[in-house]
Amino acid sequence: MSKQAGSEDGVRSRRDEILAVAAQLFARKGYRGTSMRDIGEASGVLGGSLYHHIKSKDALFVELHNGALDAAEARIAAAVAAAAGPWDRLEAGCVALLEVQLAPDSLTMPMMNDFREVPDEVRAQLVARRDRFEQLFRAIVDDLPLPAAIDRSIYRNLLLSQLNAAADWFRPGRLTPREIAEQVARLFRHEG
Amino acid sequence: MSKQAGSEDGVRSRRDEILAVAAQLFARKGYRGTSMRDIGEASGVLGGSLYHHIKSKDALFVELHNGALDAAEARIAAAVAAAAGPWDRLEAGCVALLEVQLAPDSLTMPMMNDFREVPDEVRAQLVARRDRFEQLFRAIVDDLPLPAAIDRSIYRNLLLSQLNAAADWFRPGRLTPREIAEQVARLFRHEG
DNA sequence: CCTACCGATCGGTAGG
DNA sequence: CCTACCGATCGGTAGG
């Protein structure tokens, strides 16, 4: 039993190491900018050897992308559930999302931005997962007492693209992710 | 004279045709997703033949990117100059930018989003040109009578990423670019 | 996990 | 503008 468990743990952690390395490379250099040989080199292995652990580059990317969204979703849902009123839930959601996205070694959001770099079949899977993720914010926005002149669909798209784009201009050392999120929530606060 | 002019026009228009074709491909498929052979095929020519008209793929991309920003900048500056108050200038800038960016065959903005796909030396040139472009909005934002609690640097970054990301979720047939821009301007209107 | 390799594709060039 | 090719790199595989 200990032998089997040890062996399983060994295999699992090696695979997880490779996945973690791959996620960082994808997040930094994009799908097309990261070769299997790059991932191999960063894992101390030749590119071809990775195929003992994964099926294909595409499957690897999808697995990492969806796993990152699973984690982000769980954390955001918990933060939102802990908040009271509709505007507080909005702010809690913004803070949680930006803290996930702007964490020093964040893998989540950089991967959501290169849908165009990815093969068509892969893109379809990523879009489907992302759409499910965005339902979380749809629920928050639907509860907001917004002025009638504001289109909720546009509002939601603007909010999400806001939060997703922050990684492009964020620089550590100035405002914290929480402070930026509070600014976003303030900007999006328009009482009816 | 007519012979020389005719020859120059012929060379120029052929080159311009190729540039237009390349811009569309880059905008749709990104820098890495567009090969010189793709551009050749869409121009009715083999990939290698393009090098009679251009120096390199990198130089081609930079030329297209900067040309698109030149055009966008001129149009936006004119629209902004025609507006009266600070909030009207903000709205005019948003409308002009989104109308450029969301035009059916827009080339401008899709090219601003794949900085990560591009070689380092190219990226430096694109970033420099984009920074100059964004000064236009810095001037607009600096004139706004915003509440003291709002950070103008964050505000400007949020506004620009908003406008740049719209191309990702915009679908023709629903709201027009102008209507979306008006929603953005409304959302960003917070009087001090 | 490596050696050794595959077919495909890339940006670019020589020479006409 | 084409033919013909270069060296490099890609994702992936066979066989050990």
Image (spheres, coloured by chain):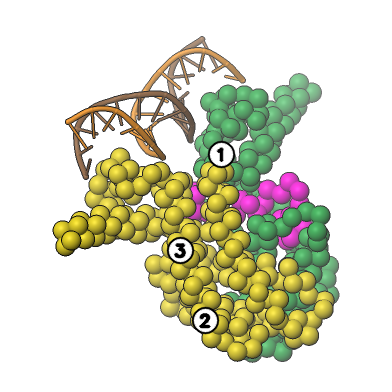
Chain colours: A yellow, B green, C brown, D orange
**Residue highlighted by disc 1:** B34
**Residue highlighted by disc 3:** A68
Between disc 3 and disc 1, the foreground one is: 3
Closer to the chain start, of discs 3 and 2, is: 3
Magenta range: B97-124
Which residue shows up at 27% across the image and 52% down it? A43
Q: Tell me the tag on residue B59.
A: none
Q: Give above or below for A145 relative to B13.
A: below
Q: Mark 3 and mark 1 in contact? Answer it, CB < 8 Å.
A: no
Residue B185: percent from left, percent from top: 75, 73
Q: Say which amino acid is labelled 3.
A: Ala
Spatial CA distance of label 3 from label 1 is: 29 Å
Q: Are marks 2 and 1 on the same chain?
A: no
Please report, as a chain letter, where disc 2 is located: A
**In this view of the protein, can residue B135 be seen by the observer?**
no
Which residue shows up at 69% across the image and 29% down it? B14
Quadrant the C terminus of chain B occupies: bottom right
**Residue highlighted by disc 2:** A79
SS type, badge 3: helix
Spatial CA distance of label 3 from label 2 is: 17 Å
